[in-house]
């Protein structure tokens, strides 16, 4: 009978530790700050609107936005864009996928899908993912 009481006590302790530990685990799991997808999308859209208006990328400094966009820097003109998706990425900032309709310096119309990675570090920093493969 003593063994049965001991076994019951051990089981009760195990259940109690699981019940007490679960809320702590859930609280710790919630400590990581979720990416603000709306803020990332808004930052990308603000930058693209400036490009569409033929403004300089440096004009975004007043909005605390910094962007590295090679087509903009090379002189392509943005005609229009469509935000395709925005998603969180583990261990990185949000990712915003956009379809760009541009006109090259030579006057050729170009449509391409790109992905921007957004980091919030004082400023909203937007960089184009050079390895993005357009989805069908």
Image: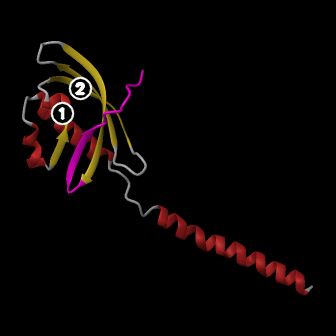
**How are the residues colored?**
secondary structure
Residue 29: image location, x then y, percent: 48, 62
> Could you say whether the residue bearing mark 1 is in a helix, strand or loop?
helix
Residue 34 horizontal side relative to residue 75, left or right: right
Residue at 15% x, 30% y is: 72
From the viewer's perspective, is residue 59 above or below residue 123? Answer: above
Looking at the rendering, the stretch of residues picked out in magenta corresponds to 121-136
Q: Quadrant of the C terminus?
A: top left
Closer to the camera, 109 or 39? 109
Closer to the camera, 25 or 102? 102
Mark 1 vs 2, N-terminal side: 1
Q: Quadrant of residue 12?
A: bottom right
Q: Which residue carries the number 1 mark?
A: 48
| In magenta stretch: residue 134 | yes
Residue at 7% x, 29% y is: 54
Tell me whether the residue at label 1 lies in contact with that at label 2, contact meaning CB atoms closer than 8 angstroms. Answer: yes
Q: Quadrant of the N terminus?
A: bottom right
Closer to the camera, 123 or 53? 123
> Could you say whether the residue bearing mark 2 is in a helix, strand or loop?
strand
Residue at 89% x, 87% y is: 2
Residue 86: image location, x then y, percent: 35, 38
| In magenta stretch: residue 119 | no
Q: Which residue carries the number 2 mark?
A: 81
Q: CA distance from mark 1 to mark 2?
A: 8 Å
Residue at 71% x, 74% y is: 14
């Amino acid at each position: 009978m003593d063994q049965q009481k001991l076994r019951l006590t051990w089981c009760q302790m195990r259940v109690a530790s699981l019940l007490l530990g679960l809320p702590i685990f859930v609280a710790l799991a919630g400590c990581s700050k979720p990416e603000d997808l709306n803020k990332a999308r808004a930052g990308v859209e603000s930058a693209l609107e400036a490009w569409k208006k033929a403004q300089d990328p440096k004009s975004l400094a007043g909005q605390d936005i910094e962007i590295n966009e090679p087509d903009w820097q090379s002189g392509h003109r943005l005609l229009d864009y469509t935000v395709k998706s925005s998603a969180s990425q583990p261990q990185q900032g949000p990712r915003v996928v956009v379809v760009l309709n541009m006109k090259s310096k030579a006057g050729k119309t170009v449509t391409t899908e790109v992905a921007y990675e957004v980091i919030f570090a004082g400023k909203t920093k937007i960089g184009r993912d050079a390895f993005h493969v357009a989805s069908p």
